[in-house]
Image (cartoon, rainbow, N blue to C red):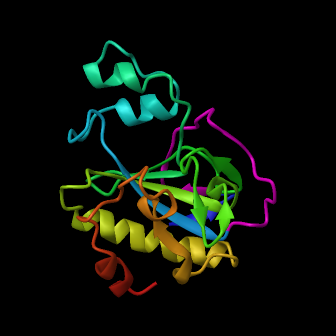
């Protein structure tokens, strides 16, 4: 696994239109861990790609009527199987954090990389996801010297009261016990 022109290989590349330029392209200093499943609690569906690429059918599921018009994305998705999909190159600003603050800095999208885990806050993540996430973090730390293991956080930590992911089921100790 490596990074070539800000794209992870051999990840599947599914470019999202939901990104823009970073205010400072050299300031990539935070990794934000999220979780997503569409519909909630259902896995191995095409709907995450559809949401991040603005093609989610509001008639596909009752839940989609409330979210199909969202313009959101993440840099990466790690599926339950460990398969990795990249939507936005790392040097661009993905739209994953929303209104957010980290250590007094607002607008976390400006300086972060967003990694989604296919999952739900109330279900354990898979061994494959932890393995891939650890490997990806190792590669990101090598490629972007402004990143550090001390600046990896959950969506719930940068948007408290608004977001709960990756949830209590995410084992932070397990992630940090894997050597990077």
- Describe residue 16's horizontal placement relative to residue 51 as left or right: right
Q: Nearer the viewer, residue 21 or 64?
A: 64
- In this view of the protein, which residue sits in the foreground, 97 or 113? 97
Q: What residue appears at the point 65 percent right and 69 percent down from the top-left corner? A: 104
Question: Outermost residue toward the front?
Answer: 161
Expressed as whole percent of the image width and height from the top left, the position of residue 71 reads 56, 31
The residue at 30%/42% (across/down) is: 37
Residue 137 position within the rendered picture, expressed as x and y whole percent measured from the top left: 49, 72
Nearer to the camera, 14 or 121: 121
Residue 171 locus on image (x, y percent): 27, 73
Q: Residue at x 60, y 46 (%)?
A: 88
Does the image show residue 61? no
Q: Is residue 104 left or right of residue 42?
A: right
1 or 148, which lies in front? Answer: 148
User: What stretch of residues is rendered in magenta?
Assistant: 7-28
Magenta span dominant secondary structure? loop
Residue 148 within the segment the image draws in magenta: no
Q: Let me know if residue 126 appears in the view.
A: yes
**Does the stretch in magenta take in 12?**
yes
- Compared to residue 10, the image places residue 50 above or below, namely above
Asked if residue 138 is positioned above or below residue 54 in the image, the reply reads below
Percent coordinates x, y for residue 162 in the rendering: 43, 49
Q: Is residue 147 above or below residue 111?
A: below
**Quadrant position of residue 34:** bottom left
Residue furthest toward the top? 59
Residue furthest to the left in view is: 123
Residue drawn 52% across the image and 38% down it = 14
Task: Say left or right for 150 vs 81.
Answer: right
Q: In the visual, does 6 lie left or right of 161?
A: right
């Amino acid at each position: 696994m490596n990074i070539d022109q800000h794209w992870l290989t051999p990840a599947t590349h599914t470019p999202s239109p939901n990104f823009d330029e970073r205010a400072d392209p050299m300031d990539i200093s935070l990794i934000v861990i999220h979780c997503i499943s569409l519909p909630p609690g259902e896995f191995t569906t095409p709907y995450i790609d559809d949401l991040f690429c603005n093609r989610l059918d509001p008639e596909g599921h009752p839940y989609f009527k409330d979210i199909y018009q969202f313009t959101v994305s993440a840099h990466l998705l790690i599926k339950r199987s460990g398969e990795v999909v990249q939507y936005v190159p790392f040097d661009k600003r993905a739209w994953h954090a929303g209104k957010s603050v980290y250590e007094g800095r607002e607008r976390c999208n400006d300086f972060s990389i967003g990694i989604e885990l296919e999952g739900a806050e109330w279900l354990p993540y898979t061994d494959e996801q932890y393995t891939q996430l650890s490997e990806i973090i190792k590669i990101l730390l090598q490629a972007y010297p402004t990143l550090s293991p001390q600046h990896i956080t959950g969506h719930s930590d940068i948007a408290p009261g608004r977001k709960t992911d990756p949830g209590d089921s995410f084992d932070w100790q397990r992630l940090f016990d894997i050597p990077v």
